Image: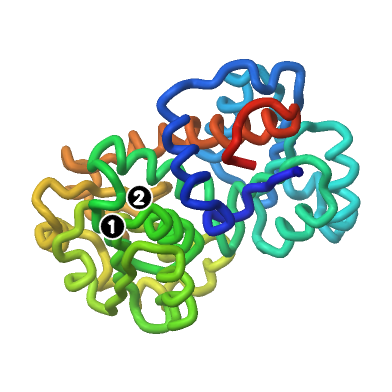
């Protein structure tokens, strides 16, 4: 059966743990002689470099394609693009504005689809985040992870991963930009513990990891002035970090608006692990790619994909 990486919640606890365990060893040659299409409707420096290097280090050939070259539902339908490119490549990876595009690709593809980001989910980032946390803090099941800011795609995928692994996710989000009751119930059903407060001070208190992200994502530029006003109290500064657990780590998936979303004093501190976090994007991508290919070859991997 062809498996896809659409979001973190589609994984079981065993599958997620399998990814984390494999990330400590570099898999080799799984993509030898194979192509991987990297479709970027939404551009990204880190995602492009980490995905290309993951494919190359596995012996494959990455093919970068800009969104305007593909023209989802403009030049061709999502379904036609998917079927045609699946004939060229072993894996299709897409970074899109609308999550429905990923779902439509999955519905017609005979090869694995990887969601490199959509408006609803950022699973590869969450995998890299969890790998980094366990390297620097320890088991997620024994940790509280505070997320401060907009409950966006990054927050959603991170919360899913923390809950699946039995940890505590503490959300500090302003009203109307937070997780609604149905979403909180969905997260709680995955396992672990979920709490939310409109107070960033309350959300961060005692946290072992503090994570934040941009308040203004690509496509939200017209809301810039309004969002800056709403989120101004959610800047992670030294005063806010002081409420977290001793030696708490700071994380941000980057790029970052310095001294707006987080102060220089925090992101440049010895407790900031944003560089290590970015580096682990390669490891996360390698493991997912390897497991997808091994399954298609009907080899090992009793757990994933």
CB within 8 Å, label 1 to label 2? no
Q: How many marks?
A: 2
Mark 2 element type: strand
- Quarter that holds the N terminus: top right
**Residue occupying image coordinates x 55% and y 30%:** 286
- Nearer to us in this view, 206 or 61: 206
> Splitting the image into 4 quarters, where does residue 136 fall?
top left
Q: Is residue 296 above or below residue 71?
A: above
Give the mark, 1 or 2, whose residue is nearer the N terminus.
1
Q: Is residue 61 left or right of residue 181?
A: right
Residue found 86% across the figure and 55% down from its top: 79
Q: How is the image coloured?
A: rainbow
Q: Nearer the viewer, residue 298 or 204?
A: 298
Residue 55 percent coordinates (x, y): 63, 26
Q: Position of residue 34 (x, y in %)?
A: 76, 23
Q: Position of residue 15 (x, y in %)?
A: 52, 44
The quadrant holding residue 32 is top right
Q: Secondary structure at mark 1?
A: strand
Q: Residues within 10 Å of mark 2 (few under 14, many from 20)?
A: many
Q: Which residue is mark 2?
A: 252
Residue count near mark 1 (Cα–Cα under 10 Å), binned few <14, some 14–19, many ≥20: many
In the rendered view, tell whether residue 285 sits above or below residue 55. below
Q: Is residue 209 visible?
A: yes
Whole-percent x and y of residue 95?
64, 49
Q: Residue at x 34, y 56 (%)?
A: 166
Residue identifier under label 1 = 145
Left or right of 296? Residue 5 is left
- Residue 131's disc number: none
Q: In whole angstroms, how far apart are the C-alphas of marks 1 and 2?
A: 13 Å
Image side of residue 83 versus residue 270, left or right: right
Q: Residue 10 falls in which quadrant of the image? A: bottom right
């Amino acid at each position: 059966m062809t498996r896809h990486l659409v979001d973190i919640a589609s994984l079981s606890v065993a599958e997620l743990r399998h990814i984390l365990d494999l990330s400590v060893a570099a898999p080799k040659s799984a993509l030898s002689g194979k192509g991987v299409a990297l479709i970027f409707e939404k551009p990204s420096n880190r995602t492009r470099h980490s995905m290309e290097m993951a494919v190359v280090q596995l012996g494959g050939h990455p093919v970068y394609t800009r969104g305007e070259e593909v023209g989802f539902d403009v030049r061709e339908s999502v379904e036609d693009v998917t079927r045609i490119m699946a004939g060229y490549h072993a894996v299709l990876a897409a970074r899109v504005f609308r999550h429905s595009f990923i779902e439509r690709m999955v519905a017609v593809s005979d090869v694995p689809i990887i969601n490199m980001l959509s408006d609803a989910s950022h699973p590869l980032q969450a995998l890299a985040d969890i790998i980094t946390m366990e390297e620097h803090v320890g088991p997620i099941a024994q940790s509280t992870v505070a997320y401060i800011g907009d409950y966006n795609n990054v927050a959603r995928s991170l919360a899913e991963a923390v809950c699946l692994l039995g940890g505590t996710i503490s959300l500090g989000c302003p009203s109307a930009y937070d997780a609604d009751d149905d979403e909180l119930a969905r997260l709680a059903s995955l396992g672990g513990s979920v709490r939310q407060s409109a107070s960033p001070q309350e959300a961060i208190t005692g946290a072992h990891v503090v994570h934040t992200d941009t308040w203004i994502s690509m496509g939200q530029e017209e809301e810039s002035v309004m969002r800056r006003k709403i989120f101004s109290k959610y800047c992670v500064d030294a005063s806010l970090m002081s409420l977290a657990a001793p030696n708490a780590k700071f994380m941000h998936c980057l790029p970052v608006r310095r001294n707006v979303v987080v102060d220089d004093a925090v992101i440049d501190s010895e407790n900031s692990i944003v560089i290590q976090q970015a580096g682990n994007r390669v490891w996360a991508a390698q493991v997912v790619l390897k497991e997808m290919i091994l399954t298609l070859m009907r080899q090992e991997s009793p757990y994933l994909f």
